[in-house]
Amino acid sequence: MDQDIAIEVKGITKNFGGYTAIKNLSFSVTKAELFGIVGPDGAGKTTILRLLMGILLPTSGEVMVFGVSVGRYPEKVRESIGYMSQRFGLYEDLTVEENMEFYCDLYGVDRKERKRRMEELLDFSGLYPFKKRLAGHLSGGMKQKLGLTCALIHRPDILILDEPTAGVDPLSRRDFWRILYGLRNQGMTIVLSTAYLDEAERCTRIGLIYRGEMPMLDRPNNIRSSLGISMVEVVLSETSRARDILLRNEYVDMVTVYGDRLHIGLKEKEQMDSILDMLRSYRFEIKGSREVIPSLEDVFIKRIR
Amino acid sequence: MGERIRHLVIKEFIQLLRDRRMRAFLFIVPVIQVFVLGYAATFDVNSVSTVVIDFDRSSESREIIRRFTSSGYFSVKANLTEDREVIPLLDKGKTLCVIEIEKGFSERLRKGIPSEIQVLMDGTDSNTAMIATGYVHSVLKKYGSPKGGTDKSPFRTRIWYNPDLRSKNYMVPGVISLIVMLTSLIVTSMSIVREREVGTIEQLMVTPIKPVELIVGKTIPPALICFFDMILVTIVGLFWFNIPIRGSFLLLALCTAIYLLSTLGIGLFISTLAKTQQQAIMATFLFFQPAILLSGFATPIENMPQVFQYLTYLNPLRYFLVIVRGIFLKGNGFDILWTEMAMLFLLGFLIFTLSSVRFRKRLN
């Protein structure tokens, strides 16, 4: 066994009923890597992370964590992994401190060790002043930090994060990444999923997921240049009116509506700012914008044209 | 293993008691239930509103009316003189019972000729009408028997266990069975479904906690609350309603524990069906209503059609009601109740095991 490998995925397939969510996937994550599972919504990112954790069992294939099979010894493997689900998974009616205590209890962190570790984590996450506050009364960014704190409470070697920054303001997002880099420098292996290109670019290596497959596994720069299309996600009101206006613009390739969000395909990435300015001039209230991973269809359509 | 369960239980209690609506549900609703069922849901018939038409106007007819009034079962609302005023009163539900004494009643009585009294009864509520008719008969029978003489009739009824036939004695112990069922169904299913709704269950599953620990940790809090509610209802029954408890309280506690196997199992089962808390509540009542109707809580099982009688064998409430009433009113012990206890245990064991298996499957 390779001493440097933290997670090894050996040909996993996952079927849900008649639908194949993950198709014969293999890859490995080395120690102290910041590995990004990157892809558009619905590509199968969360399913892959759940398979890594052993919350889902693969239909075929195997996942090994430090050489131990996840399927056979899930409890043993889980002790070395910290996991943060998409929705943070916090008890909103418990205080910050109570949430942390509860996870300490579940992981069996002993009394003496616990006090020191909680102080340490409260300090490092900046949650110290809020430790008596109910988790439900925290802001999005603070909830996310609390989620991370709870995932780190048992000193895991691997940290798995499912879209950790979805719905978090840009400032907290930057803070959060600073924390992640800090952890990685201490030797922690981090695997995270994201649909955002700016986050994908911060990883050391990314696997691109399209429809349950990983057609590309490379450094962020190589992947970005191979996409050949820029896609911007804009959160605003009146999405369908905005779409009609955008489609008349010469730089806009395509527009897809996802609820309160628009995915705008641009011919040239440099046009992003001028498009946003144009929308503002039409008095749209833009609540946020980020570059996202285009879907396989988008890339495909772009390529064949 | 025990440590993790203990901490899960503590966490559950913090969450339950911090929620104001949950607190009200757990501690106030049981008390309201006892009082409502103790006072309002009564089959006792007294002060039947009655109208009298006395065409005879004699001392004899007045004596009969006096006897009706003083029996305590009838409250005479009006004394009419005309026939045609009666029908509207019955139609509008202003009166349930009409007693008509015809002219010449006293004269015929004195001559020794059989005389008649007409009684009209509103039969909309058949149960009350039957009981009230019984009272009419007993009042008239007493009047008809020789003055000062004793009743020669060979039949004498003695009612055991609840000699005054108080509905309360029957209803209040039954409340325990309802409260325990409702509380365990709601608390168990809600606490699990909420974790799934909020997404915390996923976070729980990645900790080293085992499914068994999760099941045990999730069912202990509702079980403890049910014991508390059981004791609460018993105390109110004993000291407020003066319901006797003739059997052993320890046996009652033991049987409650057996009964909890079924109710917690059903709560667990509901948690595997429902995706949201609303669905959990709906599923609870979908089960709860027919369970009450098919339990013998208010209407005897013997009166049901055969098919429904068979269905009641699958209802844990049925067995527990027999046990609770047996312990409270008859002072029954294990020697009499063991069949019910065995059935309840068997049923509970099956339900709990099946639900646990299903629960574990849903987790993966």
Image: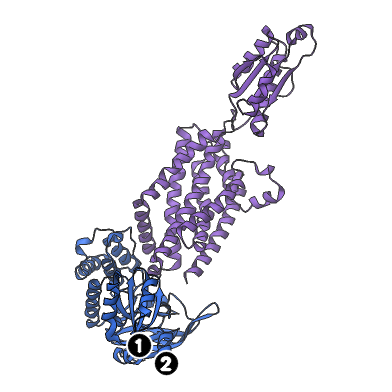
Chain colours: A blue, B purple
Give the amino acid type for the residue marked by disc 1 in the picture: Ile
Residue at image x 44%, y 40%? B31
Is A96 placed left or right of B337 in the picture? left
Q: Which mark is residue A229?
A: 1
Which label's residue is closer to the chain start, 1 or 2? 1
Q: Position of residue B171 (x, y in %)?
A: 55, 38
Relative depth, front residue between B184 and A293? A293
Q: Quadrant of residue A9?
A: bottom left
Distance from the alpha carbon under mark 1 to that under mark 2: 12 Å
Foreground mark, 1 or 2, reads 2
- In which quadrant is the C terminus of chain A drawn? bottom left
**Mark 2: few/some/many CA within 10 Å (<14, 14-19, 20+):** few
Residue at image x 23%, y 61%? A131
**Mark 1: few/some/many CA within 10 Å (<14, 14-19, 20+):** many
Is A66 placed left or right of A60 in the picture? left
Q: Secondary structure at mark 1?
A: loop
